Image (tube, rainbow, N blue to C red):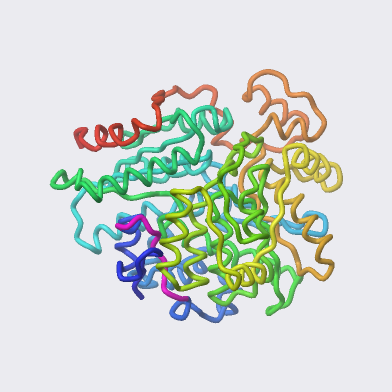
Amino acid sequence: MQYQSTRDKNLKASSAQAILNGLAPDGGLYTMPSFDEVKFDYTTVLNMDTMSMSTKILSKLLPDFSEAEMAKLVHDGYTGKFETDHLTPTVPVGENFILELFRGPTSAFKDVALSMLPRLMTASKEKLGVDDEILILTATSGDTGKAAMEGFCDVTGTKIIVFYPHGGVSAVQQAQMATQAGENVCVCAVRGNFDDAQTGVKKIFSAVSKDQLLEGKGVRLSSANSINIGRLAPQVVYYYRAYADLVQAGRIQPGDKVDYVVPTGNFGDILAGYFAKEMGLPVGKLVCASNANNVLTDFLRTGRYDRRRPFYKTVSPSMDILVSSNLERLLYLLSGDDKLIADLMKQLSENGEYEVPADMLEKLHELFWAGFCGDEGAKTAIGKVWKDDHYLCDTHTAVAWDVAQQYKQANPEHNAVVVLSTASPYKFPAAVLEGIGEKAEGDEFDVMEQLHKVTGVPVPKNLADLRSRAVRHRDVIDRGEMLDYVLGKAAAEK
C-alpha cells in the first residue's frame, strides 16, 4: 500500500517514507487511498493483550513493517512506561465508560502515540538507508510538546524543537516542557496562539522544501504532530482496546456498536476513531466535543468551515484551536478528490473559510455528531461527576462528558457510550478544584497539593516533583522568527 498526498494523489510514499517526511512536499497530509487493504476481522484481536493488539493494527496501517518487526517496536516503545501493560484502561462511570488515555509518562493521551513514533522513525531511517539527522518540528497546544520531547529525548540521530503559544498553556504544561532534559530537545514559546504556531511550522516545511534550505546539510525535517501518519496510527489502537474491554466485561456483545465521544481540537484523536471504523470495528457515532472554540461543531453541523471568529483562551487549552489540520485527511478519504481538497485548503488559507459539497455533508452527518461546552459547563460537569460517581476528571474530559449528555438526550436510542479522557486532572488543577466547589489558593503547584488533599486522588509521579526541577528552556520569539530559529538550530553542531 502506498500513501498519497491529500492534495495530489500522484505524490506517493511508502509508510516508512511518510513517517520520515511528516508532510507531503505540496503541504498535503499523507493518507491511504482507501481502507480496502487495511480491513480485517476485528474479533481476532478482542482477546489479545494491548501489545499484541497494537502489533496487529499498526502492521496493517504501516505495511513496511512486518508483524515481527512491529512487535519489537511496540515492546520497546511501551514496556515500563505506563502505569499498566494494559496502557489505556476503560472504567465504568455512571451509565457511561471512560477510556483513560493519561496513564503514560506525561499524563496525557499523546503518550500512546509519542512513545511509538521515535521507534517508528528510527526504524524507518534504517529501512530506507537514511543517514541524515532528523529534525522534528512540532507545534503544541499543551500536551503534544512534553510527550514528544519525552519520546525523542536523547534518541540517536534526532533533534526536536517544540513551539507552544506564549501564555496559552497551563502552568503545569509549561513547567513540564520548560524542565525537559535531553541534549537533543528544545522548546520555544511563540507570541500568538496555537494556530499561529501550527501555521508557522507548516510554513517552515514549505519554505525548506521549496528553497532547499537544508540541502547538503545532513539534516531533514519531520513532524511529531498528528499530521504525521506515524503519530496518528497508534491512536487507532485504543478504540479497539475500549471495545474489547466492554466485550470482556460483558457490557456489550461482539457486533454491538459503540459510540465514542472525543474532546478534540486538531481532529487527530477522533480521526483515529474513523480509521478504526473503516478498518472494521463496530463504531456507531463518533461524537466531536469542542470547547468555546467550536469551529468543528459548526462545521460538522453545517458543512461550512470558518476560522474567522474570536479565539478564546479556555480552561481546556489543548482544544483552543481554530484550524484543525487532520480534518483534511477525512475530507480526502470521504471524497477521493485531491483537486477538491487542494482547492478547499487554498480557500481556507486565503479566505479563512470553505464549504463542502452537499453529498459530503450528508456523509459527515452519517458518521459524526457534534456539540460544545464552555468553561462553566465544564466545571459543572467536573463537580457533578465527582459528586455522583466520585470520579475526578480533567477539563477536556469534562467537555466531552457534557457533550456526551447532550448527545444521549438528543439520541435516546444511542449505543453504549465511551468518553475519551485525554489528560490527568492534575494538569489543570485550579479549574478542577473550582469544579468540585473549592477555592484554589496559591500557584498551580500549591493547587495540585490542595486538590490531592481534598480528593485523595494520587498525583502522577511525573507531575509531583515538577516544582523542584530546574528550568532549562526560556526562549520566546515572534511568529515571524520561527524559520530563522529552526535554521539556526539545524546548523548547530550535532
Q: Position of residue 378 (x, y in %)?
A: 74, 41
Q: Please indicate, yes or no, whether residue 250 appears anywhere in the rendered image.
A: yes
Query: Which residue extends farthest front?
Result: 351
Q: Main secondary structure of the magenta part?
A: loop
Q: Please indicate, yes or no, whether residue 47 appears anywhere in the rendered image.
A: no
**Range shown magenta:** 25-34
254 or 341: which is nearer to us? Answer: 341
33 part of magenta stretch: yes
Lateral position of residue 200 relative to residue 239, left or right = left
Lateral position of residue 101 relative to residue 454, left or right = left
Q: Position of residue 102 (x, y in %)?
A: 59, 47
Q: Position of residue 352 (x, y in %)?
A: 51, 48
Query: Which residue extends farthest left?
Result: 216
Q: Residue at x 53, y 38 (%)?
A: 142
Q: Please tell me in which quadrant of the rendered image residue 46 appears.
A: bottom right
480 or 179: which is nearer to us? Answer: 480
Q: Residue at x 82, y 59 (%)?
A: 95
Q: In the rendered view of the protein, which quadrant contains the N terminus?
A: bottom left
398 or 442: which is nearer to us? Answer: 398
Q: 142 above or below 301?
A: above
Q: Position of residue 39 (x, y in %)?
A: 50, 79
